Image (cartoon, rainbow, N blue to C red):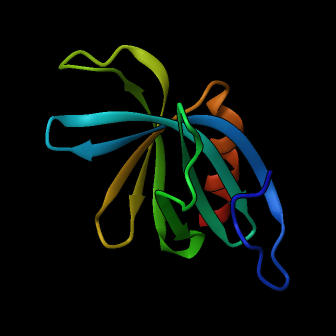
Amino acid sequence: MSILALEEHECTVYETKGDWWADSILGKQQLPGIFEVTNKRFAFRGKTLLGTAKENGLEFDLSDLASVEKCNIGNGIVKIIPTGLRLTMRDGGQYVVSILKRDKLLEILENAIR
């Protein structure tokens, strides 16, 4: 299921389920959903008990991505789950995402930066 309206000359490269660790007033909030990476963009759309959200919670052009690195994730101070990726944007902003088998997404995003 594509969560992006693909533009001309754009194709989906990778799609998977996972979590976005979004900033909230209580710190990081784990939001389950779907990630889609195209040859141009990265997007996340959350899922709730009522179904999939109608709009993407996170979406950016791959050209805005400065770096990607592995990180551990978890609630609280101790982060011990080795499924995270920290995405750093050219403007200094950061996003933390979490998926099983993160090496595939890491490789795709590293190649997009080059």
Residue at the image position 47 percent from the left and 42 percent from the top: 69
Above or below 76: residue 66 = below
Does the rendering let one see residue 114?
Answer: no
**Residue 1 pos. (x, y %):** 80, 50
Please state if 11 lies on the left or on the right of 101 as rendered.
right
Residue placed most toward the observer, 72 or 36:
36
Q: Among all residues in the image, which is located at the extreme front?
A: 50
Q: Position of residue 35 (x, y in %)?
A: 63, 47
- Report whether 96 appears left or right of 47: left
Whole-percent x, y for residue 24 in the image: 22, 44
Q: Which residue lies furthest to the left in this view?
A: 25
Q: Which of 105 and 66 is in front in this view?
A: 105
Where on the picture, by quarter, is residue 72? top left
Residue 53 in picture, x, y percent from top left: 55, 51
Left or right? Give the position of 91 relative to 98.
Answer: left
For image coordinates 68% across by 53% down, the residue present is 36
Q: Residue furthest bottom?
A: 8
The count of marks equals 0
> Does the image show residue 83?
yes
Between 66 and 54, the one nearer to me in the picture? 54
Q: Which residue is drawn at 48% across and 73% down?
A: 64
Side (left or right) of 96 relative to 13: left
In the rendered image, the quadrant that contains the C terminus is bottom right
At a point 34% along the width and 20% down the height, the residue shown is 74
